[in-house]
Image: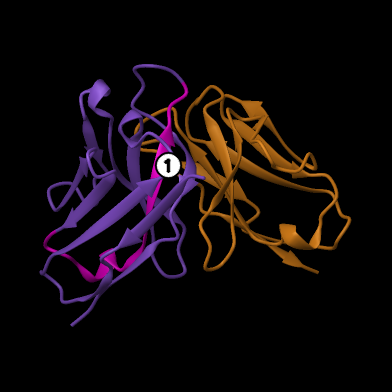
Chain colours: A purple, B orange
Amino acid sequence: EVQLVESGGGLVQPGRSLRLSCAASGFTFGDYAMNWVRQAPGKGLEWVGFIKSKTDGETIEYAASVKGRFTVSRDDSKSVAYLQMNSLKTEDTAVYYCIRGRRPYAGTSAYYFDYWGQGAMVTVSS
Amino acid sequence: DIQMTQSPSTLSASVGDRVTITCRASQSISRWLAWYQHKPGKAPKLLISKASSLESGVPSRFSGSGSGTEFTLTISSLQPDDFATYYCQQYNSYSHTFGQGTKLEIK
């Protein structure tokens, strides 16, 4: 059974940093791109970023709203994905989901999302 | 970036009703569209990929259609478990844009 479990969420002051972890199990972690999507309170879903598999060069892309502040990484030996969030703003307050990406064809940089974690709440407030 | 617009934002319906949700893309995305069901406090669930491919385990009352810029999600006979928020998502480009969601409520 595929499982994704996020951890590391919490309350943080504006301008500070936080790192989320996503522990994966039930599939060959290294074969898949891992994505992060967030949902601010009362809002819809917003893609944050992804990291491709090692065989796809571990290419990383980000949404414009977080580029330069957030960093996605992975440790295939531990089956864990990370989201390092720096210079946090109040508008970053959201539930952050870790997601396995499925690509429709080789070479694409776009995915649909077949397995989601339960989410980690990040609250940025003074 | 590709914009995704869903309608309606809220839909009130009764058990047994047939309902349709529309998703429009600001430019052609071929058939690279997914639909998700989201209930409060739970992880979103993938229902349909490539506009009309039903995921394993998803009831056959769910169906998707469309290509290019206009897509629909249809639930043929609403069940109590179907009341949730539904999102479309394009994966034609790496911006992975979602629609704003359609909340399906009990009438």
User: In this rendering, would A115 be left or right of A85?
Assistant: right
Q: Is residue A9 above or below residue A98?
A: below
Q: Is residue A19 above or below residue B63?
A: below
Q: Is residue A121 above or below residue A4?
A: below
Percent coordinates x, y for residue B64 in the rendering: 69, 35
- Residue located 13% across and 65% down the image: A17
Asked whether the viewer can see residue B12, the reply is no
- Residue located 52% across and 68% down the image: B41
Task: Say whether residue A88 is magenta.
Answer: yes
Q: How many discs mark residues in the rendered view?
A: 1
The answer to which of A1 and A43 lies nearer the viewer is: A1
The amino acid type, in three-letter code, at marker 1 is: Thr
User: In this rendering, would A38 be left or right of B34?
Assistant: left
Q: Please identify the residue farthest to the top as the structure is shown.
A: A106
Identify the element where label 1 is drawn.
loop
Question: Which corner quadrant holds the C terminus of chain A?
Answer: bottom left
Q: Which residue is mark 1?
A: B97
User: In this rendering, would B60 be left or right of A71?
Assistant: right
Percent coordinates x, y for residue A100 in the rendering: 41, 41
Task: Say whether residue A97 is magenta.
Answer: yes
Percent coordinates x, y for residue B13 in the rendering: 80, 61
Q: Quadrant of residue B97?
A: top left
Asked whether the viewer can see residue B79, the reply is yes
- Residue located 36% across and 21% down the image: A108
Q: Dot 1, how many residues are within 10 Å of its Cα: few (below 14), some (14-19), or many (20+)?
A: many
Q: Please identify the residue farthest to the bottom as the structure is shown.
A: A126
The answer to which of B36 and A77 lies nearer the viewer is: A77
- Residue located 16% across and 77% down the image: A13
Marked residue chain, label 1: B
Residue range in magenta is A86-104
